Image (cartoon, grey):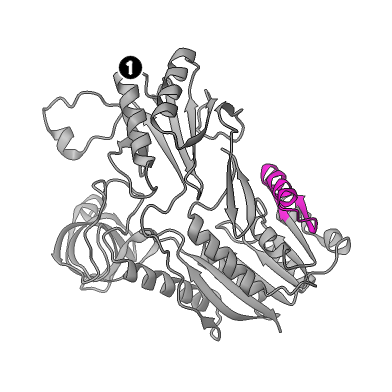
Amino acid sequence: MSKNRRKNQILENIQLVSAGAKGVAIGRTAEGKTVLVSGAVPGDRVNARVKKAKSNYFEAETVEILERSPFRVEPKCIHFGVCGGCKWQNLSYEKQLDIKQDEVFNHIKRIGGIEDFETLPILGSAEQYFYRNKMEFSFSNARWLTQFEISSEENFGSRDALGFHIPGMWSKILDLKECWLQEPPSNDIRLAVRNYAAVNGLDFFDVKSQQGFLRTLMLRQNSMGEWMVLFQLFREEKENREKLFEFLLKEFPQIKTLVYTINSKQNDSIYDQEVIIYSGDGFLMEEMDGLKFKIGPKSFFQTNYRQALELYRKTLEFADVQGHEVVYDLYTGTGTIAQYVARNAKQVIGIESVPEAIAAAKEHAELNGLSNCTFYCGDMKDIFNDEFLANHPPADVLITDPPRDGMHQKVVEQILKLAPQRIVYVSCNSATQARDLALMKDQYRLVKILPVDMFPQTHHVENIALLERI
């Protein structure tokens, strides 16, 4: 069979029995070949069209559901299936948690090669919707059109949009009518901005020609109900800008600060841009168990505030510091976990590669009156070396929270040289975490793991692992 014919073929009567990476469901053909199916959930029986034909598996999309899974639920959002943000809205939350727990457990066993450890029940999120405290939306003059709209001869008018990028199509934006990720008045603010811009003829960005006025909109909130609004503008239009900003401030008194940047470069990153304060202080304050944090437009802060609070509490519980310990916090970020631990520790040493994050960590430590925190900036594999270990006290406890790629092998080697009594490994990718645990298992025993669901309706899951020196 030719490659093109294989790609267009329909696989019939596929029973989907499990979940795979990125939210696909997994089944097998009658011949035993694995099929990864999008648009379905475990328990469905489907006909699916092949999108990619590999030597040992197919990637396919659902064209007909023959039998509905008992775990299938009705998605809440009208954009489900087009927007790529909440791929599991059609799967019951209980089943989502089961799948995530199994994924972490299987990674530790299969990739880590570790058999004997305690698996605590996954910590589910109290809020399955409206849990994000930060959302970013893009303006575009090339709104995504559905297949129905494309084939229709109807004139759909303006192509302006404010919403999310269509997965795999960076120049196309889904015009959001609603979103279930951020609590009110997020939807109202976004729609008010979109309507004001349309009525007043403000230009939406053209990503291909790099022209336009309105580029991106970020909405950020704290747990006290205060909001930050950040606009990225491609060019300055002072009168239009000020009228838009004043309209928003009048309509939404919850907006505590409004900031903007003029970004005329090709990408949307603001980290190399000057952010200008139009109204308010230019930041929000957040409090977590008595600790205060200053959240600016460029700050990294966990987007699920309530679940992050539970994650930090469990990390502190696993660390079990009693007041006399020296604690190392690798990949410390803005020092949130470090400061949680510092109140119970003798000394905390944090390391992070991002200068702005380290500056924030130092500012937060001073804000919280924590004089026992010391922070260092540099690439982890370079700064965390033999000289660093020789010039600092040995660690009793080490906490590490690396990015999705996990820890560099050199970092693992230095941890083994440091030889703390306990290691608490927080991970957003249990596969790379399991790989790293395998490198340490000759010197450390994996005591227990606790999966944590930070992002309901998605396939993402975090995991906390406690290791003790053998």
Give the extent of the magenta segment.
351-377
Q: Pinpoint residue 460: horizontal percent, then vertical percent.
A: 44, 60
| Residue in the picture at 48% in, 55% down | 304
Q: Secondary structure at mark 1?
A: loop
Q: Is residue 468 left or right of residue 179?
A: right
Q: Which residue is mark 1?
A: 201
Is residue 68 covered in magenta? no
Relative height, residue 12 to residue 229 (above, below): below
| Residue in the picture at 37% in, 50% down | 181
Relative height, residue 344 to residue 265 (above, below): below
Which quadrant does the N terminus fall into? bottom left
Q: Is residue 317 left or right of residue 377?
A: left
Q: Pinpoint residue 180: horizontal percent, then vertical percent.
A: 33, 49
**Amino acid type indicated by mark 1:** Gly
Query: Crowding near pointer 1: few (<14 within 10 Å), some, many (20+)?
Result: few
Relative height, residue 8 to residue 30 (above, below): above
